[in-house]
Amino acid sequence: MYEHDVIVVGAGGAGLRAAIAAHEEGADVALVTKLHPVRSHTGAAEGGINAAIRDGDSWEDHAYDTMKGSDYLGDAPAIETLCQDSPKETIQLEHWGMAFSREDDGSVSQRPFGGLSFPRTTYAGAETGHHLLHTMYEQVVKRGIQVYDEWYVTRLAVTNQDDPAERDCHGVIAYDIKSGKIEGFTAKNGVILTTGGLGQVFDHTTNAVANTGDGAAMAYRAGVPLEDMEFIQFHPTTLPSTGVLISEGVRGEGGILYNSEGERFMFEHGYANNEGELASRDVVARAELTEVNNGRGINDEYVHLDMRHLGEERIIDRLENILHLAEDFEGVNALEEPMPVKPGQHYAMGGIETDENGETCISGLYAAGECACVSVHGANRLGGNALPELIVFGARAGRHAAGKDLGTPEITTGKTEDTEIGELDTPVEPGAVGTPEDAVADGGTTMAQPSQTVETALEAERARVERLLERDEGVQQAELRAKLQKSMTANVNVFRNEEGLKQALRDIREVREEYENVYVNDPSRTFNTDLIHTIEMRNLIDLAEAITLGALVRDEFRGAHWRQENQERRDDVWLKHTLLSWEDGTPELWFKPTILEGEDGEYEPKIRSY
Amino acid sequence: MSTQVPEKTESETETETETERTETPGDRRRAEKRARQKGTTEAQETTETDEESIHLKVFRYDPEIEGKMEPRFDDFHVPFTKGMTVLDALMLARDRFDTTLTFRHSCRQAICGSDALFINGTQRLGCKTQISDLEEPVRVEPLPHAEVVKDLVVDMEHFYDQMHAVEPYFQTNEAPSDELQEQHQSRENREKIKMSTRCIWCGACMSSCNIAAGDNEYLGPAALNKAFRFAMDKREGEDMREHRFEILDQEHGVWRCQTQFSCTNVCPKDIPLTEHIQELKRSAVKNNLKFW
Ligand SMILES: Cc1cc2nc3c(=O)[nH]c(=O)nc-3n(C[C@H](O)[C@H](O)[C@H](O)COP(=O)(O)OP(=O)(O)OC[C@H]3O[C@@H](n4cnc5c(N)ncnc54)[C@H](O)[C@@H]3O)c2cc1C
Ligand code: SF4
Ligand code: FES
């Protein structure tokens, strides 16, 4: 058993920032992470960090742009906090030595980005995330913060009162990947989940293989609501074989999209007569898939992105990195041939419901970063707004978790008397199949001592792993994962309709039932990736279901969520968040209104035109 | 160069595992499962005959059965598709034929640094290496000169220790007190350190370095490159620079490098490592001259 004041699960941008903040408050902090910190997916971010740090810019403008970008589904207080804190957090990174790109006078550079009314994207080459991640890890080393790397957290130690808002989180259970030990970690003050994205729910994603949404799924099963899960951002230009991202910069510089008939379809088929390739991400993604569906895709799968006409000199000057990506990951020489591209899952806008301090409805449980939904991105995230989210809300969660003993969370969550409960019309029963024990990931007992709660969870977890390892026939996770990912991509992708969403729910159910017989082929305790992938698989199932349920119930078109039957934004009914919570193994749906009221008045919803 | 296998005796391994887990009724069943599974590896050799396939020879090693079984190579024939990387092939081999095959990987785009492997006799990132560029059969082994944990996974602790030994964090006494005021840095100075900041901690360079292989205390190319990144950053100031050279200018520091360029040749991020080390040597000399 290990004991610390604050335990941060995950060590990407959000986790590292949270750990540093908690450490600065004087807490004994530990980072528990399934990958070594520098291997976290934050390192893959390219574009930059939005921060209003220049004369002529203001946090208010940044907030306005973000609210509009969110298609009015972001919450004003969270967005204003993001925009107010981002400048000092960004400069903080600079004080820690981050090698930002520089202007002639030595100040940090900023560049324009989609949806921003001011060039406020602060960057370090096309490797901003790499720099950010390493700079913060360096600070963690400097402070001597304890890192348990290659420890896979599989369960939260949460007490089991009926009402989630009365539960306490006392720690986590984790598997030491190298030695095979399963151990409990007690957190005296709080546990902060910063486990990142969930791209592996889909079979084509820009996300890392480790992005399986573990934190969101664990919090969900422990009773914390998941918010706005239907909002998944798809990026229009990813390489078909790997999902590696081809930056929007290519189209920005004049790259052209062609179909198999050599047509410049954005114009010729009228998808965006004014903006063409430079229309917003969702428009381009929908256009590409329409071409493929109408038989004008290449190999029935993708379209071409051509930048040859830009000339070698300009390409090398501004897009050199793209040449390497196309060459290394697709075997294509982009100076001589067009690049194959198709839309790919990119970012989860929804996640664990938190307030601006990272608090969830469970006392002592916090979340920050991509796994959380403090509600700054709403229905559509602006490029360059995720990295500030990590540092702003990572820091706030860290400070808050360190600063006090377990207390009643301030977040007003959970259902109140006037909560609007949603109807779920599903073709199959959603939620858990098997025993209640499997249904709830928590392992606590009411009124227990913290260490006892962790002990109970530990025993439950050891038993679960033992069962997975002992079983020697059944189905393997790789098969289930492929099946789930395939259905999600076919049915809950850029295009959505009722029939497809219901099919996805049927497929998820099937996978869930088969998962009851999942078995781990590798009997070894040491570095058992088969076991890890099998545990991750359970998380993917729960999250896929949450995404699909949200998408089914929201019968409107907002931001990244497009519904065939209803291609309109319906502000009269849908200016509200979807929340799903896990009640005894059954997902329950309810809503809460979007907060449009900011510091200086209300943000007025406006039509998004292309 | 051959791959090292941990020099543990069978009995050591067994005592170690014994203390770490409690005996359960499942243990015996797991042993049976393992025995059955050994029998199945043969079957993987013949698959997918009508598709264009790639022949992989993959190093296998499981510490929990070490002694009972020699480290071995397994053959996998996986269907080839255009653009396929070595990592894609390994994932396919694992997911289709043998889920016990173990290797580290995550980003699939040469940025997380977790899949540095010894492929056809060279240190490379699995995800950045196109299968079509390689001769068959493609031999995939763990990084040489590191202890094998299991299959293709090596212990990175020594690498991390060396990185941490150079104080890999920005230090200055002159940071602005105003939380919104930047510390200016010239474009030239940023350009100077740019390549050194690209390191993804993959360990390929360390693994390729003969000197590091012979001298366990040698800081090695990655750590020296990290030191370069800070020593050359003008924002750190003179006193800190002196401190940095004290770390580098010691027996197992910069002077160990014999400019063999093997690190520079394998670095997947094209960092001019040898050149950086040479520059540190020159600066160290200059630094000393100043004090005389
Ligand atoms: C290709 C790409 C480019 C992007 N570019 C930009 C950009 O230019 N600007 C921008 O603002 N945003 C960008 N984004 C989005 C942004 O990078 C991510 O949202 C953000 O980095 C997520 O950070 P995080 O700290 O939440 O999670 P991650 O960095 O993914 O970290 C997750 C951590 O959790 C750990 N973990 C996960 N599960 C467990 C578990 N069960 N037990 C223990 N540890 C666990 C992992 O080991 C890891 O350390 C981009 C995203 C992608 C994919
Ligand atoms: S210097 Fe290059 S080879 Fe060495 S660890 Fe860094 S990226 Fe890898
Ligand atoms: S998988 Fe990340 S570097 Fe290859």
Image (cartoon, coloured by chain):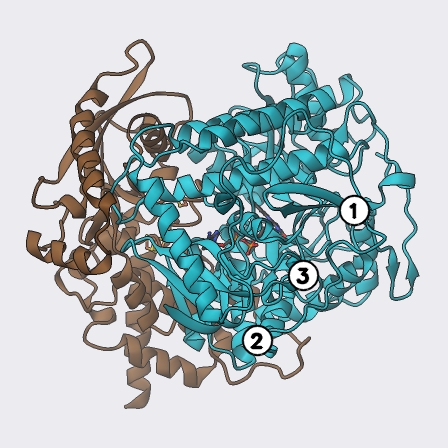
Give residue A591's mark: 1
Marks 1 and 2, the one that precedes in the sequence: 2
Instruction: Give SS at disc 3.
Output: helix
Quadrant for the C terminus of chain B, please. bottom left
Crowding at mark 3 (Cα within 10 Å: few <14, some 14-19, many 20+): many
Question: What is the crowding at mark 1: few (fewer than 14 residues within 10 Å), some, or many (at least 20)?
Answer: many
Quadrant holding the N terminus of chain B: top left
Q: Is residue B242 left or right of residue A77?
A: left
Chain letter corresponding to the colour brown: B
Can you tell which of label 1 and label 2 is closer to the viewer?
A: 1
Question: What residue sits 55% from the left and 43% below the top?
Answer: A198
**Which of the chains bears the disc numbered 1?**
A
Residue A104 to residue B49: above or below: below
Q: Is mark 2 within 8 Å of ligand 1?
A: no
Chain the render paints cyan: A
| Above-or-below relation of A270 to A344 | above
Please determine if labels 3 and 1 lie on a single subunit.
yes
Residues behind callouts 1 and 2 on a single chain: yes
- The answer to whether mark 1 is within 8 Å of ligand 1 is no
